[in-house]
Image: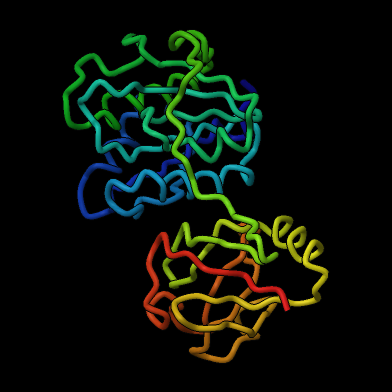
Amino acid sequence: MKEADGGPIITLTTDFGLQDHYVGVLKGVILGINPRAQLVDISHNVTSFSITEAAFSVAAAYPYFPRGTIHVVIVDPGVGSSRRPVAAHIKDQYFVAPDNGALSLVLEAEPQAEVVEAADRRYFLSEVGHTFHGRDVFAPLAAWLSRGIKLEDLGSHLLDPVKLKFPVPEFLPDGNLAGQIIHIDKFGNLISNIPAPILQEALNKSGKSNYQIYLGGRSITRIVEYYAQGKEGEPCVLFGSTGRLEIAANKAGADKILGIGLGTKFIVNFI
């Protein structure tokens, strides 16, 4: 594994928050095995137990890291159960996570991924408890990968990693497009499952030149390129940094304005 200059990069995505000692312990374990590791926090504020949110976060982040980066994803409501620990080699980067769907979007984007069940206990801590596998299993696995251990040394190849079904855009019989909110960020921006190419394809098929969004009983017609183009406190539509259609509001939370939560469905109406 070719590491980045200055030492191998290991990222952390968890639902641990920063109030307790958990994140610090992860870092201590990693640095105890590889003091040269560069640790990067993607997020520790994933909603508790939300595997789908963790999957979204790591999928949005990993393309911007250099070759050889190791991503640790720990949202693990099944900790201590029979769920498997997995490690994966995906597009010249590595991923370590519980086999609960946390890598679903990454695996979907990179179908040639190599995945193993990381079951070789030589690469765990010497004592493995039942409640903190982030410390005892996943942090050590990532650290040993950063030391040059090969993926296949961690365990046997896995052909059936858990993949959660994320909603996909739906082309409707009337020519319109149905979408769904799959993520709400800290600013209250409603991020959908519609990437720009899909919307453009639907727009081309419709033969129309514009569109509007029907969401939460409202029609949203203002389409902008960046947040400040919208009127303060008024919902607008744009494509954000993830390349997906978003409903946002300038200097306000669109989620609160519209009373919208995760999973809300909406219609893109071509006009």
In the picture as drawn, the residue positioned furthest to the left comes out as: 130
Q: Which quadrant would residue 47 be assigned to in this image?
A: bottom left
* Screen quadrant of the N terminus: top right
Say which residue appears at 31% left-offset and 10% top-offset.
Answer: 121
Residue 219 appears left or right of 78: right
Q: Judge by depth and name the residue closer to the eye, 224 or 22.
A: 224
Please state the horizontal and vertical placement of residue 188, each as a whole percent of the image: 43, 72
Please state the horizontal and vertical placement of residue 240, each as a whole percent of the image: 62, 66
Say which residue appears at 49% left-offset and 37% top-offset.
Answer: 104
Q: How is the structure coloured here?
A: rainbow
The mark total stands at 0
Relative vertical location of residue 233 with respect to residue 151 in this rendering, above or below: below
Say which residue appears at 36% left-offset and 9% top-offset.
Answer: 120
Q: Which quadrant would residue 204 be assigned to in this image?
A: bottom right
* Screen quadrant of the C terminus: bottom right
Q: Judge by depth and name the residue closer to the eye, 216 or 122.
A: 216
Please state the horizontal and vertical placement of residue 80, each as a whole percent of the image: 20, 26
Relative vertical location of residue 262 with respect to residue 132 in this rendering, above or below: below
Please state the horizontal and vertical placement of residue 9, each as a whole percent of the image: 53, 35
Relative vertical location of residue 222 with respect to residue 191 in this rendering, above or below: below
Relative vertical location of residue 124 with respect to residue 5 in this rendering, above or below: above
Say which residue appears at 21% left-offset and 19% top-offset.
Answer: 128
